[in-house]
Image (tube, rainbow, N blue to C red):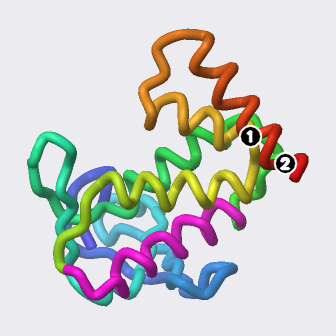
Amino acid sequence: MRCPFCAHEDSQVKDSRPTEDNTAIRRRRQCDSCGGRFTTFERVQLREVIVIKSEGKREPFNRSKVEQSVALACRKRSVEQERIDQLVSGIQRQVETAGETEIPSSLIGEMVMEGLRQLDSVAYIRFASVYRDFSEARDFEEFASSVRDVGNS
């Protein structure tokens, strides 16, 4: 594993343990050259899935993009990191086990929306504002009232 500090090719694993949700192995490593310590994660990848973006561009599914989007939506909210990791792992499992080699980005966006709706209503509205491209305050009001209506049912 290449060192992120000095780019040396070799490092030693000092500690390995499963993550809290048992979906990955967390490894603490130390660079043989500079002595820097860093963490890596090893995850199972069932198949290579290609994401078809709205403008037609194709790129490999990238778990970290989903993680960043969910983390940004949940920023400064009282949502535990473990629950965010579980949501992202669940979305990744759905994508990889769907049986398709290509999946539209809109479907992934809907999976994130559904997961955030169940996780935290404010994070859900934050994500929706970007995903659905809200342009006016009225868009927020209409969406927030639909979230309230669902919560009251």
Q: Nearer the viewer, residue 150 or 56?
A: 150
**Relative side of 149 to 35, left or right:** right
Q: Main secondary structure of the magenta part?
A: helix
In 3D space, how far apart are the residues under numbered discs 2 and 1 (Cα atoms)? Answer: 6 Å
**Relative side of 99 to 43, left or right:** left
In the rendered view, would you say 115 is above or below 74? Answer: below
Q: Is there CB contact under 8 Å for labels 2 and 1?
A: yes
How many other residues sit within 10 Å of disc 2, few (<14), some (14-19) or many (≥20)?
Answer: few
Q: Which residue is mark 1?
A: 147
Q: Which mark is residue 42?
A: none
Q: Which residue is mark 2?
A: 151
Disc 1 secondary structure class: helix
Quadrant in which the N terminus is drawn: bottom left
Q: Position of residue 149 (x, y in %)?
A: 81, 41
In the rendered view, would you say 151 is above or below 47? Answer: above
Region of the chain picked out in magenta, as a range: 83-100
Disc 2 secondary structure class: helix
**Relative side of 142 to 9, left or right:** right
Residue 128 is inside the magenta segment: no
Q: Position of residue 135 (x, y in %)?
A: 46, 14
Q: Nearer the viewer, residue 12 or 49?
A: 49
Q: Residue at x 69, y 79 (%)?
A: 20
Q: Nearer the viewer, residue 152 or 47?
A: 152
